[in-house]
Amino acid sequence: MASGSSEVEEEEQERMMLRDRPEWADVTPVPQDDGPCPVVPINYTEEFAEVMDYFRAVYLADERSPRALSLTAEAIHFNAGNYTVWHFRRLLLESLKVDLHDELEFIERIAAKNSKNYQIWHHRRRVAEKLGPDARNAELQFTKKVLSVDAKHYHAWSHRQWVLQALGGWEDELDYCSQLLEQDIFNNSAWNQRYFVITRSPFLGGLKAMRESEVLYTIKAIEAYPENESSWKYLRGLYKGETTSWVNEPQVSSICLKILSSKSNYLFALSTLLDLICHGYQPNQDFRDAIEALKIPDLDTQDLDIASMICSILEKIDPIRVNYWIWRKSRLPQVA
Amino acid sequence: MVNCRCLTKVVCGFDFAILLHFAFLAASFLLRLVVMVTVCNVSFMAMFTFKMGELVTDKHVKYILSVEKRKDDFESVVMEHLRMNGAYWGLTALDLMGKLDVVDVNEVVSWVMSCQHDSGGFGGNVGHDPHILYTLSAVQVLALFDKMDLIDADKVTNYIVGLQNEDGSFSGDMWGEVDTRFSYIAICCLSIIHRLDKINVEKAVKYIISCKNMDGGFGCTPGGESHAGQIFCCVGALALTGSLDLVNKDLLGWWLCERQVKSGGLNGRPEKLPDVCYSWWVLSSLIMIDRVHWISREKLIKFILDCQDKEKGGISDRPDDAVDVFHTYFGVAGLSLLEYPGLKPIDPAYALPVDVVNRIFFKK
């Protein structure tokens, strides 16, 4: 169980049942209305069931008191998923005018064990909203902590995006993305955040302004790990709405050629080249040579145009998606 | 199988005069053909089952019923606030396996109704606050049992309409959490009770499209990472509002089929582990945009079947992990979408058996 909270100090010593605590003597607990079968609980469940019985009592009485607040903390420690308890806790925070900085700390302790929980993140957002721009650094720190344990944590990223847009802090975000990508270049969430920053940060000038530097960055990433789905998609995304620029950008076609020539991890290089051709790119003989040098077995490349050749290769090297590549072949622009 | 098809073609090619002349011979030939086709089908099924593994339906039914009955262990106490979701998962899975009749209808239905609030919304269990999540599950459970007449459609509609925001998005409850999951839930629920016109559909669609990413996928909010669960919600909502033309089906279809990993399972985002629940989120999305043939059906079936606990019943997120009702439902639903024999067909947008959806829309 969590430690360090003054509200649940009892847990560090032997926990006392609520029915034995004098400050709760005036309350009649309300049992769960579940049906006729009586419950035979084990001890742990008995403690939890008792907390919920007392919670129901204060909830139904709408008792807005410090002991009720304390009780919601106990209930949350047992079960952080119970949204009704969080709901009532929010009402209590309002009525009792609790210092919300303390609440941020409470949430952090709960999140340490329960981070994949919608209620915690939603509650955190409500509290941060109330604190306003003051909460900015705390929120960026908090999400950073969670992401240091799980760099793809969907809730943490969602919360972080909200913080940036509502409270600010864009200045260091691109660097943060770079750090995470250095740790794991395959982190799709970090690539997504990178795109989020370059397209939305008020300090960076937008996608077009960032394109040149980002293309360089992405090409480097592709060279290092050409089997990385995220980096190829990111490269494409840099030319959103400007397909012609993407087709005509020499760096794009040349990275395809480079990877093909390396004869290693060339699946996305092939599929990108295919996409380029379908948008009007006309590959020179170097490409054809590089593809033939792959020496794919059982492939009759003699009369095939390069796009059909690519599709045939992809059918072979990505067999789980053979139907997709067959479909791509059927949709190729007709060769004159 | 191929031989059977060829023989069928040969029979149809017979000259009519010859057929008349040799009517007796033709009749007996046809009889033999029927027997052969049947034998072919049976041996295909046997081969199918042998190759793919078996769905231990009876064990799963037993497992689901045992979960519904259990109230005293830690897991069920901890999950009691989302019992409405659990009911939907368990009961829909039972219905897909043709075993809904083992449940006491009246007990379930009266419990569901006792979770409704004056606002029209349903809570996750008795004594829990209303939330859009449990409102949909409640309506879906009532639909399973053909008890739609118990629903005060206006009341439920008021609750949901009240949750739509200025920008077209939906909140989960009075506390204002926004997520495209809630857009799907609102649209699905209102569609089932024939009140879709009561929300601002245009704005709802606009908001969903604002969550479309450059990879063709959708996130929870604008700019949020594409995620198979969110994609299901957005594609489902667009399907139910007749707005699928706004989806780049080829681009999204490729993103979705890229979710299939070597083991045959599906993940929810690039470079993540496969999980049985994505058999639903990814698969239903692919079906709704007519691109399901882009994944390997056999490999996915094998993956789902490998996630079964063949002794105790139930399905887990990946092979050899602990089972739960959530993954049992998604595994069975995924197999239904893949037309695994012995399961009722399921509607990919409503996430209800097709006969239930037909009853909703075509019953007088």
Image: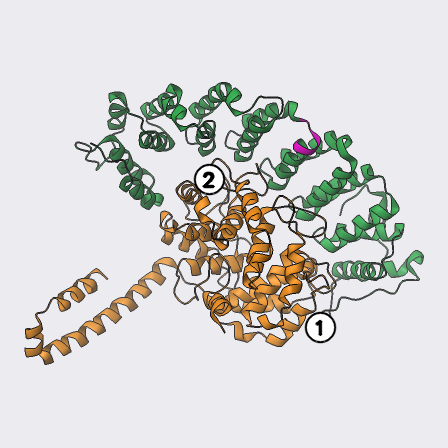
Chain colours: A green, B orange
* Quadrant in which the N terminus of chain B is drawn: bottom left
Q: Residue at x 59, y 72 (%)?
A: B149
User: Which residue matches tag 2?
Assistant: B216
Q: Position of residue A105 (x, y in %)?
A: 78, 38
Say above or below: B24 vs A131: below
Q: Are dots 1 and 2 in contact, CB under 8 Å?
A: no
Q: Which residues are magenta?
A: A165-169
Q: Is residue A136 left or right of residue A4?
A: left
Q: Is residue A166 magenta?
A: yes
- Disc ID at residue A35: 1
**Residue A53 location, quadrant:** bottom right
Q: Is residue A194 left or right of residue A118?
A: left
Say above or below: A285 vs B346: above
User: Residue A292, can we see it?
Assistant: yes
Considering depth in this image, is A172 or A313 the residue closer to the camera? A172
Secondary structure mainly formed by the magenta segment: helix
Dot 1 alpha-carbon crowd within 10 angstroms: few under 14, some 14 to 19, many 20 or more: few
Q: Position of residue B353 (x, y in %)?
A: 48, 65
Q: Which element carries disc 1, helix, strand or loop?
A: loop
Q: Position of residue A178 (x, y in %)?
A: 57, 24
Considering depth in this image, is A268 or A4 the residue closer to the camera? A268
| Amino acid type at image mark 1 | Gly
Q: Is residue A113 magenta?
A: no
Total labels: the figure holds: 2
Q: Residue at x 76, y 52 (%)?
A: A87
Q: Position of residue A137 (x, y in %)?
A: 73, 29
Q: Residue at x 42, y 47 (%)?
A: B263
| Amino acid type at image mark 2 | Gly
Q: Residue at x 69, y 57 (%)?
A: B78
**Residue B111 location, quadrant:** bottom right
User: Residue A73, can we see it?
Assistant: no
- Disc ID at residue A115: none
